[in-house]
Image: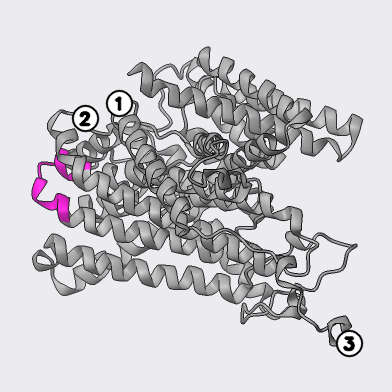
């Protein structure tokens, strides 16, 4: 009979179906959670200057909703609907705080309130491009799903523990309590958490950078020395960032002609989905080919140029600049936005932290060096600041979804299922972004009038106004770019040693270096004693530490500090 032939399609009830982001109940819950997430982001960034990762919070709320037996809300017992919920709330949080409010606040502090609405339109476009590039590049060899993306692991393990209970839930709860306690004493549970999850060498470089930043001034004769004032971390990041871009290009150039790559068409065929029951896990194979990666990065740069052109027109700076200068500004703005998202994304992928403020400051300084006028520079900095955070956050969310869907990796339809789930998460993120845009449009004036300004916006505006007063800045940037580039080359694209060292030098996290070193030591000892099988449990401990630290950070909203 035909039903017995190998070519017959699987029965409908045996096919993998991922929930849709636009199911009515899912959409309503998504919008409500996005409103909560956007407000949390706005509050935190204007009071503390930070944005909490609300993914875990969204997952926990979705779990609670799933226990409600009325109005069909019990559907949220499904881990994939919980994943859509946490994707939306975290996207709304970072979009509202980092990608939208912070850039337009620069114009307010700068005394150009007339540019806020045009700038809001421009940074919203940048946000959309930012998320689109990540969606198209995630799963490639440059941004693999199997990379650490630590907060994504935390979200996924929280959802899995809530679904499975038992020992996993106890381990997660215990490590979450420890993360809360560390945060209570002013220590970063996330620092220890990522060291249990991420690449050992990358996290070691991050710890070294944090240690140098914290303890350099206690050395004899260095009491008044400042790394940031001399642009040393910035120079290292520039050198490492340039090499990182070259490594990204090299990945898809070298791999393009290899026969074992994912087909360049990106089409999902039955042959692609047919996977053996034994052998390598199909989930670990790249889902974006080198050609798709090249199209994502190249197309993203082109879109950033169009966005910069639009921004120059609606802000009016195009009428104040000669044609050649305008073309140069558009190319520079697109380059800054593109490089910013790549550097921030790589740091986030390996460490769970992203130095968005520091990298934006790098391009601000470069703009001052090349002599950009104040207003075009202010617009450029706002555009640059809008990219990166959403890129990193969506990487975390897609990582969480990948972990939850990986249980079906031996199913014949896994590849189509994974890509479908990833697409639904992208839609949930877009819903979160739309809510965040509406919230910022409605609330920015009341925030700014009351003096609720993100601190980094004030730094950007004041730096632009003051200009580059350090004559040694250019020399230091170029000088320290050399070791940054060398370290990045030595580490390769998988370890990102230069980017991670610069990230540590740019961050101020008291005693975080010792938490990283201790966690790495524990991880290496446990792995040596128990073998590779211990990695899953160590990752669960790391996830709990990150989740506990995130909940503690969120608690600061309610304490009003």
Is 108 part of what is drawn in magenta? yes
Q: Quadrant of the C terminus?
A: top left
Q: CA distance from mark 3 to mark 1?
A: 69 Å
Residue 452 circle label: 2
Secondary structure of the residue carrying numbered label 2: loop
Secondary structure of the residue carrying numbered label 1: helix
Image location of residue 465, percent across then percent down:
16, 40
Contact between marks 3 and 2 (CB within 8 A): the answer is no
Image location of residue 133, percent across then percent down:
47, 63
Q: How many marks?
A: 3
Q: Please tell me whether mark 3 or mark 2 is closer to you in this view.
A: 3
Q: CA distance from mark 2 to mark 1?
A: 7 Å
Q: Residue furthest front?
A: 70
Residue 1 circle label: 3
The color scheme shown is one colour
Q: Residues within 10 Å of mark 1 (few under 14, many from 20)?
A: some
Where does the magenta region start and end? 105-117
Q: Residues within 10 Å of mark 3 (few under 14, many from 20)?
A: few
**Residue drawn 52% across the image and 60% down it:** 20
Horizontal side of residue 500 vs 437, given as left or right: right
Is 354 part of what is drawn in magenta? no
Q: Earlier in the sequence, mark 2 or mark 1?
A: 1
Q: CA distance from mark 3 to mark 2?
A: 71 Å
């Amino acid at each position: 009979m035909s039903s017995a032939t190998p070519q017959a399609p699987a029965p409908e009830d045996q096919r993998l179906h991922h929930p849709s982001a636009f199911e009515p109940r899912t959409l309503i819950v998504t919008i409500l959670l996005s409103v909560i997430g956007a407000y949390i982001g706005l509050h935190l960034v204007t009071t503390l200057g930070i944005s909490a990762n609300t993914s875990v919070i969204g997952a926990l709320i979705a779990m609670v909703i799933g226990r409600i037996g009325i109005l069909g809300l019990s559907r949220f017992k499904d881990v994939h609907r919980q994943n859509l919920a946490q994707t939306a709330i975290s996207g709304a949080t970072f979009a509202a705080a980092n990608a939208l409010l912070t850039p337009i606040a620069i114009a307010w502090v700068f005394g150009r309130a007339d540019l806020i609405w045009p700038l809001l339109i421009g940074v919203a476009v940048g946000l959309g491009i930012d998320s689109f590039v990540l969606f198209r590049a995630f799963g490639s060899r440059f941004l693999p799903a199997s990379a650490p993306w630590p907060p994504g692991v935390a979200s996924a393990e929280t959802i899995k523990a809530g679904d499975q209970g038992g020992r996993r839930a106890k381990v997660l709860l215990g490590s979450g309590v420890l993360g809360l306690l560390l945060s209570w004493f002013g220590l970063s549970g996330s620092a220890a958490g990522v060291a249990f999850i991420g690449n050992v060498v990358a996290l070691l470089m991050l710890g070294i950078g944090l240690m140098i930043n914290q303890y350099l001034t206690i050395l004899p004769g260095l009491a008044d020395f400042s790394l940031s004032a001399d642009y040393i971390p910035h120079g290292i990041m520039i050198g490492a960032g340039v090499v990182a871009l070259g490594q990204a290009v090299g990945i898809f150039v070298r791999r393009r002609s290899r026969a074992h790559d994912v087909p360049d068409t990106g089409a999902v065929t039955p042959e692609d989905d047919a996977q053996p029951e034994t052998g390598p896990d199909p989930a670990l194979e790249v889902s974006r080919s080198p050609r798709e990666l090249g199209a994502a990065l190249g197309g993203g740069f082109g879109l950033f140029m169009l966005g910069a052109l639009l921004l120059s027109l609606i802000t009016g700076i195009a009428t104040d600049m000669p044609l050649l200068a305008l073309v140069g500004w558009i190319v520079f703005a697109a380059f800054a936005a593109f490089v910013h998202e790549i550097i921030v994304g790589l740091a986030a992928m390996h460490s769970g932290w992203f130095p968005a403020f520091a990298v934006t400051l790098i391009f601000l300084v470069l703009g001052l060096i090349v002599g950009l006028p104040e207003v075009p520079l202010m617009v450029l900095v706002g555009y640059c600041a809008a990219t990166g955070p959403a890129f990193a956050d969506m990487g975390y969310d897609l990582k969480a979804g990948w972990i939850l869907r990986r249980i079906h990796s031996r199913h014949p339809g896994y590849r189509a299922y994974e890509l479908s789930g990833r697409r639904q998460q992208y839609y949930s993120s877009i819903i979160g972004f739309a809510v965040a845009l509406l919230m910022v449009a409605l609330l920015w004036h009341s925030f700014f009038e009351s003096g609720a300004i993100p601190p980094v916006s004030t730094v950007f505006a004041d730096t632009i106004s003051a200009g580059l007063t350090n004559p040694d800045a250019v020399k230091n940037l170029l000088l320290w770019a050399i070791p940054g580039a060398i370290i990045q080359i030595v580490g390769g694209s998988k370890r990102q040693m230069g980017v991670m060292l610069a990230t540590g030098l740019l961050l101020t996290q008291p005693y975080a270096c010792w938490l990283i070193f201790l966690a790495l030591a524990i991880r290496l000892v446990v792995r040596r004693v128990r073998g590779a099988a211990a990695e899953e449990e160590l990752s669960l401990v790391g996830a709990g530490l990150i989740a506990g630290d995130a909940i503690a950070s969120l608690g600061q909203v309610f304490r009003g500090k």
